[in-house]
Amino acid sequence: MRSLLLLAALALLALVVRDYLGSRTAAGRDSAQAVPTLPEDLSAQSESWRLTQTIGDSTRMEVSADDFVQGADGLTTDLSGVVLEIFRLQAGSLDRVESDAMRMLADGSLYSDGETLITLGISADGGTGRPVEVATSGVTFHPSANSANTERRVDYRFSDGAGSSLGAAYDATTGVLRMMSEVRLERFGPNPDEPSAVIRAGSLLYTEDGARIELAGHARIEQGTGWLECDSGEVLISSRRIRRIEGVNARGGESVADRRTTFSASRLEAEFATSGELARSRGSGTARFASIEAGQRIEVKADSVDLHYEAEVESSSSASSSRLRRVEARGAAQASLHPSGDGTVSTIESESMLLVLRPGGEQIERVETPGRGTLHQFGRGADAPARTLVAGSIRMAYGPAGTLERLAARSGAQLVQRPADQAAPELRSWSDSLDALFDPETAEIAELRQAGNFGFEEGPRRGSADSARFELDGGVLELEGNANVASTGGDLSARQIVLARASGRIDAAGDVTGFLIQEPDAAGQSGAMGMFAGQQPVFLAAGAMVSDPESQTLEYQNGARLWQGRNRVDADSILIDQASNSITARDAVEAAWVADGGNASDPDSLSIVRSGLMRYDAQTGLARFEGAVDFRRQGMRVLAGELQTALGADGGKAGMRAVAVGSVRIADPPDGTGHRAFGDRAEFDAAESEVALVGQPARILMPDGTESEGASLTYRIAGDRLLVLGQGEERAYTYRPASR
């Protein structure tokens, strides 16, 4: 601002010449009697020439010259030792213009070829204020046009700065000052150790009306470690302070210690606070901003980028400065955040976004997208994991060390996570909201939560829940509330499901339901596999479930059931061993199945076994029941210690053969009104309606009181006939009541 005092000096000098020429005739008359005889080439000559202009009792201007010489042609007048003093009555100061020689030309212009010194702001009462000094030469004043100009170098010095230009012109009528070329302005800092501000420009144009400065021809502003360049620019001034700067094709930056910032834009607008500190700047038209500190880099680009500054007071000197506090980007905005070392790189895209820096403007504090945004995160290196997040709004919070600590997404979040192993499937998830915590040391996600209509896909696996929690290091996915996981092998629902994604282990609890689909075996066999047909869904229900792919087992607990059609197994716990293709049920076991050839809708064709333990081998179709076995089928009840039956072997005669051992008791029908049998072992052939009974002895009791016994008995039921046969050479005995 003070560099424009050259303008004021030239303007004052032009006014002095104008006033002088207006009163030149009267002054000539007053001094004519003192003029001696003149040489032939002179028309007038005078020594110690002086002109005073007053307003009332106050002197406004004094012009004096050591010598006054007018040429014989009457067209030129030479003044030597010229001093012009202009008094500023209200300011209590005066301005002085000094030149060894000036020539007044026929057109009324005044020309000073030699050194011209202009001193502004001299205290009228002899005070100690520092005046402004302007030195130049080759100055031409045009009183009629109220202007002045020079093509030579102009130097000036004021209280807190200095400057120069090559050539200058001033038009007092329009209030326009033009510094022709090689403009350099410098403003000194208030403290000796404070860097000065330097402005360089190809040319400078100053307009008093509106207090506007125009810079052209590649302007550059430097202060300390900061700089700004533009092809052309405009500076607006109010109350002697810069209020606004506009630049075309602007670029700039700052370097402090290990922090470096740069920016560029097709058009730059900067606004300053009343204290003179930078308050805000806006770059538009492919604007870019970058900050690098301690290896961390922030890059922002958008159609427009706003930089907001906050004033800070340095306690050591009580001097104020401004630091960058917020960055607002609009229009195809994109920000890249590169951590130091090998941390995760984040790139966020949105129509608009906000970046907030910590007080001091040194490190990022948070990043926000008020509207829909896309976040890409990827580690450095070809084998590093990567993820992409799309959401209605995104917020990223950074810690004091400049590492990402928290990530939040709202209004619908869609996340794609690509593992480091390129052969592994992507994990895609979506939800109403997403929250992530990051490990401060590794900058990787330590915990990830998604809530509201959560869903995911990973290879053939997919699922849903009310909410979910990820532990990415361990590959754990916890589903809460209406949880469901499905794959080619089946479907699972529960109140809670915990999935170890790497190993495939699943833990489910609370109202567990679902179904399984058996895969064909290695030999390509499929079809009937005992009580559960292959490649058909087997439904399940339990209080809890554990699926462990490593051991190839599925365990259902707290009241479990497996069923397919009317074939089912109920127990407190059921273990499916997929490696051996077997089922083990424990405690309160009840198994039911429809024998081959039976009618599934006919209750009498259903076989039911209750026991403490069941072991079922689907390959052979054999089921073994242990512990208080209670077996019922087609109107017959068998109680025994153990029972073994074929559920799918022997040419498709599932449930047609069975062996019972250990205190075998048989009732036909189950209510005991028919025949009853006792033994240590019994073999049943349902197809032949035959029972082979072994015991010490084996016994059969008929409803009419007839009793048969022997070491081994075989009996058949055909209509109402009962045949009792011995076994081999052993005899069978039959006893009838005496009444018969």
Image (tube, helix red, strand yellow):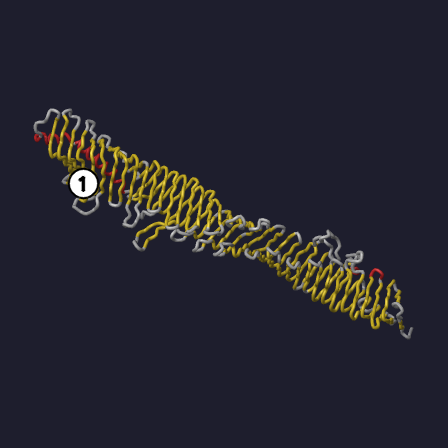
Helix, strand or loop at mark 1: strand
Q: Is residue 685 above or below residue 198?
A: below
- 420 or 125: which is nearer to us? 420
Expressed as whole percent of the image width and height from the top left, the position of residue 28 reads 12, 30
Quarter of the N terminus within the rendering: top left
Percent position (x, y) of residue 443?
49, 54
Camera-side residue of 111 and 90? 111
Q: Is residue 138 visible?
A: yes
- Residue found at x 24% / y 43%: 158
For residue 566, say whether it is visible: no
- The quadrant of the rendering that contains the C terminus is bottom right
- How far from the left and from the top, in percent, is residue 677? 83, 69
The residue that disc 1 covers is 87
Measured along the vertical axis of the image, is residue 580 above or below residue 49?
Answer: below
Residue 600 x, y percent position in the rendering: 77, 57
Label 1 crowding class (10 Å Cα cut-off): few <14, some 14-19, many 20+? Answer: many
Where residue 572 sits, quadrant-wise, is bottom right
Question: Horizontally, is 125 left or right of 573 in the view?
Answer: left
Viewer-closest of 137 and 327:
137
* Residue furthest right as drawn: 740
The amino acid beneath tag 1 is: Phe
Q: Is residue 421 above or below residue 31?
A: below
Q: Which of the pair 391/158 is nearer the observer?
A: 158
Asked whether, in this view, residue 339 is left or right of residue 72, the answer is right
In this rendering, the count of numbered labels is 1
